[in-house]
């Protein structure tokens, strides 16, 4: 197991280097640089342009800039945002809890709805519920997040007045310190009456929007996995033993059918973070996705490079943990060639 | 079934939520996060807006206008032919307190010196804090304009200039010239956290800073000691809402009271909503189509006039600006005091355009380059579409325009070098002073790398431009600017396309809100009924 762990860990090193390289190159392929991005119609004198480029090290050969960047990264230095002059790591840590809170809620929404729905669809295979669910999940899977978010805001928030439009808390009625950065937790800690419920109300729409695509995937995956399991001999045996249908499906079939579903949930972490970029913009959710979009516009190289690396670290770490857990659970993976 | 019903009721109650009684709060839906709270190092309107409630300047723009009025300086004298300006500072002005700093003294001349020296003197202890890029101080040519800034006593500061320029009074009302607390700066230096000066701001303005959460909210509270027009609400909140549709929805639901940047496509619907108010005014900007007067055949006035008359600007305003634009007759919008309403609009007259080309001896078909802007700007929402419409209009008079563009940085550089034959460009005013627009057609800007992409240089225009900088009497200055507008109209170094019309929307119960021609958002004197 230790060898497997070391081998798996070693595999992440080239991944990190590849990521560093790609991020570094990609942002430099976008026209303009951080100095020019600040300049308006008035322009900038060649002297000032040269001065600021020198100050930021942009006048160095690109390979040298890359080496410096890698060196800093290896020392855990993610740099300072050119726009805000704040440490990239500080900005990331300030914003990341909001993204995690939203992603966890979105995943809860997707799992709590998707798994039972997929299981029921499998049991009622070919029936109306099955057909309807598959259509809806396909619809959800292919839904453009931006459009879906705005539609929900218009209908649920503006027309029905059921949820707030955007943000994380009612800014007029609630104000408290946020030691954890998780609004629901901080609302509870604040002791202000109604704050926790208000934080939950603000989470409803963004979580639904962000969770819609994983919901579609999980529902479909659960259904197909369940169909496979339901045709297994041991399920037939369980039925023959006279167990109740609920027990057969819920205990014997679903538990085994969930293995590939768990894999999909693990894989969804990266797509959730990608979806968060749009969801956070629509719902004014102060997370890392929106921050990265802003950084691209400002050509804020350190924020963008550091941000991507930090997010990638999270995704890679999650995948590593998932792989290790699998390795522990399934020896075939551990010893696979 | 009963359980499901109860659960549904519980969920509905949760979703409907509860509201608690609160102090009077004004919520402004802003469009983005500020870079920091130090206007001297910022360049974006979003960042300036966030600092505006906190700080004052020596001079101020009158709320809702471009007129310069007293600020922290309650009066001033211009002497020495416009080269010496003596400011008499207001007494008894209190700085705000923040969590770990309480000011021990009132505002005085030391704060003025600190605020300018930081931007001006490279050896100042704060010069390099937070990146040390003082773009506006440099862009407004302050280093080459200023000879000295001296304090003669605690409440008198004398600015000596190298060349006369009364427009400096408008410069000093700009955000970059905000006055911070020198005492707070010293305190932070001793504490070892000077960068906090730009993150946790201390000013003298109508609101004091309370808290900021990136990409989420900025909170301010009313400054009860404010010397000027008082805040009528207890708290001011900037709800940072980047998406325009979400801003509109929040305005509809009352989650915010003012939306500074509505989408043009939403305006008609907004106007029909009785719970909202839509206000508008000409933006302090200009979109134009520059003719490079250094390149034939556009070195001939008639050829430039001909191209000007070939363009149907009404169609462009209708199709591209979607009503959020006003046909321009001069470089400056009508909200500025130097605007000359006697200047006629350039007519759309293809026949006359053909005749003028012929009179100028320009053979058709004529091939020209038409550079279009690769980015959307407040004054030009879609350069490519405008370019295509212009191209079609020009074809009607026998001019074959080839559409050209570059990456924005490259575009600006090449335009400044005069590489284009014709090209779209524009300008957003900084301070409402006419000089801040007319300098764009000055002869110095016509040199390679200069700010005048038309490369047109007219001696009379240039003399008047320089002379106007020395006259402090507004009516006298206006006469010179009127003459300059006549010359520019006759010489046609460009076709003036449009000034954008800037819209803002508020809840109907918001009173006292005044739109600023400078694109600022200010909240003193604003109330929620």
Image (tube, rainbow, N blue to C red):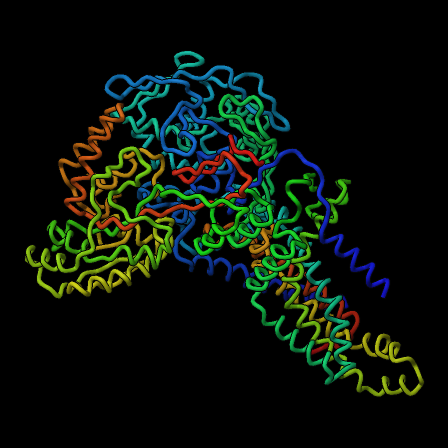
Q: Is residue B113 left or right of residue B6?
A: left
Depth order, front residue of B239/A305: B239
Q: Is residue B315 left or right of residue B269?
A: left
At 41% across and 44% down in the image, what residue appears? B280
Q: Is residue A238 visible?
A: yes
Depth order, front residue of A77/A286: A286
Q: Is residue A108 left or right of residue A312?
A: right
Question: What x and y, as percent, mark residue A26?
Answer: 47, 60
The image quadrant where one finds the C terminus of chain B is top right
Question: What x and y, as percent, mark residue A157?
Answer: 63, 55
Q: Is residue B124 visible?
A: no
Q: Is residue A313 above or below residue B529?
A: below
Q: To which quarter of the image does residue B41 belong?
A: top left
Q: Is residue B137 left or right of residue B33?
A: left
At 38% across and 54% down in the image, what residue appears? B376
The image quadrant where one finds the N terminus of chain B is bottom right
């Amino acid at each position: 197991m230790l060898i497997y762990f070391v081998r798996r860990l070693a595999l992440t090193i080239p991944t990190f280097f590849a990521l560093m390289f790609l991020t570094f190159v990609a942002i430099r392929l976008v026209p303009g640089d951080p100095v020019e991005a600040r300049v308006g119609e008035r322009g900038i004198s060649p002297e000032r342009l040269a001065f600021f480029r020198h100050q930021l090290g942009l006048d160095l050969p690109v390979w040298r800039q890359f080496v410096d960047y890698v060196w800093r990264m290896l020392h855990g230095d993610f740099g300072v945002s050119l726009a805000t002059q704040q440490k990239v790591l500080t900005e990331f840590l300030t914003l990341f809890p909001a993204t995690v809170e939203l992603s966890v809620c979105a995943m809860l929404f997707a799992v709590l709805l998707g798994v039972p729905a997929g299981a029921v669809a499998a049991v009622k295979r070919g029936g109306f519920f099955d057909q309807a669910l598959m259509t809806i999940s396909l619809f959800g899977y292919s839904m453009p997040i931006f459009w879906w978010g705005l539609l929900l805001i218009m209908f649920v928030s503006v027309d029905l007045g059921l949820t707030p439009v955007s943000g994380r808390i009612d800014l007029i009625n609630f104000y408290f310190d946020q030691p954890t950065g998780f609004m629901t937790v901080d609302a509870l800690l604040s002791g202000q009456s109604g704050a926790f419920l208000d934080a939950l109300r603000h989470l409803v729409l963004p979580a639904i929007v962000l969770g819609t695509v994983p919901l579609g995937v999980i529902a479909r995956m659960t259904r197909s996995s369940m169909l496979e399991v339901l045709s297994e001999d041991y399920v037939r045996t369980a039925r023959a033993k006279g167990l109740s249908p609920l027990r057969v499906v819920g205990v014997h079939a679903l538990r085994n059918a969930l293995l590939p579903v768990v894999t999909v949930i693990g894989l969804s972490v990266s797509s959730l973070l990608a979806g968060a970029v749009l969801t956070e913009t629509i719902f004014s959710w102060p997370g890392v996705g929106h921050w990265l979009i802003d950084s691209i516009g400002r050509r804020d190289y350190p924020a963008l490079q550091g941000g991507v690396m930090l997010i990638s670290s999270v995704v890679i770490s999650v995948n590593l943990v998932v792989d290790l857990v699998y390795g522990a659970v399934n020896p075939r993976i551990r010893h696979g060639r | 079934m009963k359980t499901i019903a109860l659960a549904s009721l519980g969920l509905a109650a949760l979703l409907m939520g509860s509201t608690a009684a609160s102090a009077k709060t004004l919520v402004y839906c802003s469009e983005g996060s500020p870079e920091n709270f130090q206007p001297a190092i910022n360049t974006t309107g979003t960042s300036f807006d966030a600092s505006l409630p906190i700080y004052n300047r020596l001079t101020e723009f009158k709320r809702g206008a471009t007129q310069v009025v007293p600020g922290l300086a309650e009066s001033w004298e211009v002497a020495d032919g416009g080269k010496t300006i003596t400011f008499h500072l207001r007494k008894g002005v209190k700085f705000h307190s923040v969590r770990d700093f309480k000011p021990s003294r009132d505002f005085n001349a030391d704060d003025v010196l600190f605020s300018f020296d930081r931007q001006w003197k490279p050896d100042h202890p704060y010069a390099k804090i937070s990146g040390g890029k003082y773009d506006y101080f440099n862009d407004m040519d302050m280093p080459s304009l200023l000879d000295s800034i001296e304090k003669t006593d605690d409440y008198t500061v004398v600015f000596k200039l190298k060349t006369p320029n009364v427009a400096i009074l408008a410069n000093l009302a700009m955000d970059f010239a905000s006055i911070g607390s020198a005492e707070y700066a010293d305190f932070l230096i001793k504490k070892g956290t000077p960068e906090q000066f730009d993150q946790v701001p201390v000013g003298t303005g109508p609101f004091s800073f309370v808290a900021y959460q990136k990409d989420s909210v900025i909170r301010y509270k009313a400054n009860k000691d404010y010397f000027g027009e008082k805040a009528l609400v207890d708290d001011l909140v900037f709800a940072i809402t980047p998406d325009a549709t979400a801003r509109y929805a929040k305005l509809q639901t009352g989650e915010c009271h003012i939306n500074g940047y509505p989408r043009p496509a939403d305006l008609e619907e907004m106007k029909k909503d009785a719970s909202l108010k839509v206000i508008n005014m000409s933006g302090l900007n200009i979109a134009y189509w520059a003719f490079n007067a250094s390149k034939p055949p556009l070195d001939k006035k008639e050829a430039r006039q001909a191209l000007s008359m070939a363009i149907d600007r009404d169609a462009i305003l209708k199709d591209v600006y979607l009503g959020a634009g006003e046909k321009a007759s001069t470089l400056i919008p009508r909200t500025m005091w130097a605007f000359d309403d006697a200047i006629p609009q350039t007519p759309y007259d293809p026949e006359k355009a053909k005749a003028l080309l012929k009179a100028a001896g320009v053979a058709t078909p004529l091939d020209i380059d038409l550079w279009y802007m690769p980015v959307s700007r407040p004054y030009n929402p879609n350069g490519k579409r405008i370019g295509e419409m212009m191209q079609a209009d020009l074809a009607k008079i026998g001019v074959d325009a080839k559409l050209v563009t570059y990456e924005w940085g490259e575009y600006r550089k090449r335009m400044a070098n005069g590489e284009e034959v014709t090209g779209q460009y524009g300008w957003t005013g900084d301070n409402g002073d006419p000089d801040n627009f007319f300098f764009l057609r000055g002869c110095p800007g016509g040199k390679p790398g200069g700010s005048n992409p038309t490369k047109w240089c007219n001696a009379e225009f240039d003399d008047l431009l320089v002379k106007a900088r020395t006259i402090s009497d507004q009516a006298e200055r206006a006469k010179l600017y009127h003459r300059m507008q006549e010359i520019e109209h006759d010489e046609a170094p460009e076709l003036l396309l449009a000034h954008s019309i800037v819209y803002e929307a508020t809840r109907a119960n918001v009173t006292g809100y005044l739109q600023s021609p400078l694109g600022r958002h200010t909240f003193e004197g604003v109330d929620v009924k």
